[in-house]
Amino acid sequence: MNSRPLNVGLIGLGTVGSQVAERMVSWGPQLSRRAGVELCLKRVLVRDPAKRRSIEISSDLLTSKPSDLLDDPAIEVLIEVAGGDEPIRSYIEQAIRAGKHVITANKVVMAKHGPELLDQAAERNVDVYFEAAVGGGIPLISTFRMDLQANRIERVSAVINGTTNYVLGRMSSAGISMHDAVREAQDAGYAEADPTDDVEGFDATYKLAILASIAYEIKVRPAEIYREGINGIEPVDFRYARELGYAIKLIAHTQRHPGRVEARVHPAMISLDHPLARVEGAENAVFVEGDLVGQVLLVGQGAGGRPTASAVVGDLIDLARSIRRGVQSRPSFSFDDRIGVIPIGEVKTRAYYRIRVDDKAGVLAAIGQVFAEEGVSISSFIQKDAWSHDQTAELVVLTHPSLDASLQKARERMAGLEAVRTVSSFLRVF
Ligand SMILES: NC(=O)c1ccc[n+]([C@@H]2O[C@H](COP(=O)([O-])OP(=O)(O)OC[C@H]3O[C@@H](n4cnc5c(N)ncnc54)[C@H](OP(=O)(O)O)[C@@H]3O)[C@@H](O)[C@H]2O)c1
């Protein structure tokens, strides 16, 4: 073992940080043996050092002054598990400038600024590890960076947000509203008090931006990714989906096309035969297709203090080994700037519409005409429930693959038809 310890600074001692610190302290000798060097937790930056902590930690380690970590030349590695954009991005940048290696679980920073931070790190000859930023404990980044290096990645499809998967699962199995399912998820600790980031698809979009960037080695920004949340889906949609052989999931999908890539996050009907349809509760799953390896499915706990700490501390061991051996064991990234993201309107997909119409003659013909004029071909047209009290009926339409722009146009035009009360649901079929 190398005689000089490797000093580590930690930013954040919350859900993830406390598990990282706990592992480093309680499993110190094992981790150090694997790393080939003694790993020493030297300083921990928090907002409030006086706060009660869930683990036992010496108060001498705690500080609220960023400079105690960033300006300490003895600290060679900075682990950032605080979260959010600023001031954390600046801390990471400062650490890189000071020649420190960085390990982060921060999807927001990596999705928005990852390529720049990785470029800066390469210039300073240090590394940025971010396994925990996507998929918590599931080894994704290292899988792309190491094990799938020989492949051209063709597509990645994922259920990558545990909160929405839990919510959609409860709506499907218990027939409850989204509002009630979100409340249940909050009570079970799967959803934040403010669930916007998850429910609106932002969290999945950050993760897809990172996955797409490393899968294709291009810069994919969250703002370039088409995003739609799970609002608007009703329990009846799960019933119809099941009857038609589908589940409903929030899908993050990216696919390579000549000169461009597709990248989108939205709820979708997915065939019950697809492995992603079977991802339950707060689990995450990532389905990768490489030209050499074929299909690979990675499944596991996408969040939680312990699974996420598994990824962070795993990064630390790998990094420590490289630092002390003086060799970079992982290839660095180089991002191609010339490849852009295809606008959603140009993507080809199938769609499901649930339409409430007046129960009278001629309605089907009018709807059929809209689809025909938009060049969308229908694969099934089913009349579901009819209500005599207001003479309305519910129609379900499934289409063949069409341009998304045409599907949207058909939706708009149908909503304007006299006999159509409302287009209650529109879901892409995956
Ligand atoms: N939780 C998960 O399951 C999970 C999974 C994957 C990735 N992540 C990522 O891991 C990171 C941490 O998540 P978490 O759930 O552990 O968060 P958390 O429980 O809210 O903990 C955040 C910690 O960071 C400290 N902190 C926040 N802002 C700070 C600042 N400006 N300066 C100094 N310290 C600051 C807080 O200090 P105080 O304690 O003094 O308030 C707290 O200890 C986030 O990027 C998150 O996206 C989390």
Image: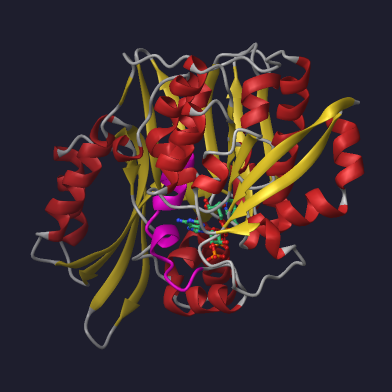
Q: Nearer the viewer, residue 233 or 99?
A: 99
> Magenta stretch mostly in which secondary structure?
helix
Left or right position of 134 against 329: left
Q: Does 126 appear in magenta?
A: no
Q: Nearer the viewer, residue 424 or 252?
A: 252
Colouring method of the image:
secondary structure
Q: Does 206 appear in magenta?
A: yes
Q: Position of residue 41 (x, y in %)?
A: 73, 46
Left or right position of 115 against 272: left
Q: Nearer the viewer, residue 54 or 249?
A: 54
Q: Position of residue 260 (x, y in %)?
A: 34, 19
Residue 347 in view in this figure: yes
Task: Place residue 45 in its image quadrant.
Answer: bottom right
* Segment tinted magenta in the rendering: 192-207
Q: Is residue 49 above or below residue 283?
A: below
Residue 366 in view in this figure: no
Q: Is residue 362 above or below residue 8?
A: below
Count of numbered circles in the view: 0
Q: Nearer the viewer, residue 198 or 82?
A: 82
**Residue at the image position 77 percent from the left and 42 percent from the top:** 40
Task: Place residue 148 in its image quadrant.
Answer: top right
**Where ligand 1 lies, by image quadrant?**
bottom right
Q: Quadrant of the N terminus?
A: top right
Left or right position of 89 against 420: right
Q: Position of residue 353 (x, y in %)?
A: 32, 55
Task: Place residue 166 in its image quadrant.
Answer: bottom right
Q: Is residue 56 above or below residue 88?
A: below
**Residue at the image position 60 percent from the left and 14 percent from the top:** 291
Q: Position of residue 230 (x, y in %)?
A: 40, 60
